[in-house]
Image (cartoon, rainbow, N blue to C red):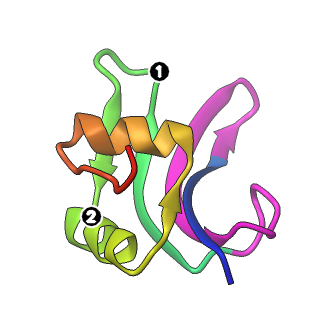
Amino acid sequence: MAVRLRLTRVGGKKDPLWRVVVADQRSPRDGRVIETIGHYNARTEPSTIVLDEDRARSWLAHGAQPSDTVRKLLRIKGIEAPGG
């Protein structure tokens, strides 16, 4: 099973909020998740990024691959993803 750290959309119409989740890469964007490890709001100034850094590092150590956007968020929070 290939596991990814990625974003899933929550919030209202034209008011997106994003959760940072751990999910099987085959599941749909807003489908079943394994664990929620944070949230992201790009509409605030500055952007709000909240991550459970211990859980993120744990999943990365076990081979989970972050999406490109989550890789950028991890870098902002000071967490270096393997291969990036």
Q: Residue at x 58, y 80 (%)?
A: 34
**Residue 55, how many percent across, how many down?**
30, 73
Residue at the top extreme, as displayed? 45
What type is the residue that disc 2 sits on?
A: Asp
Of circles 2 and 1, the one toward us is 2
What amino acid is labelled 1 in the image? Arg
Position above or below: 31 against 83: below
- Name the N-terminal-most of marks 2 and 1: 1
Residue at the spot x=80%, y=69% of the render? 26
Q: Identify the magenta region.
A: 10-32
Q: Which residue is mark 1?
A: 43
33 sits left or right of 43 in the view: right
Secondary structure category for the residue under label 1: loop
Front in this rendered view, residue 78 or 81? 81
Q: Quadrant of residue 29?
A: bottom right
Left or right, residue 19 beside residue 27: left
Q: Which residue is mark 2?
A: 52
**Label 2 residue SS:** loop
Q: Nearer the viewer, residue 46 or 82?
A: 82
| Direction from residue 83 to residue 2 in the image, left or right | right
Please identify the residue farthest to the left as the structure is shown.
78
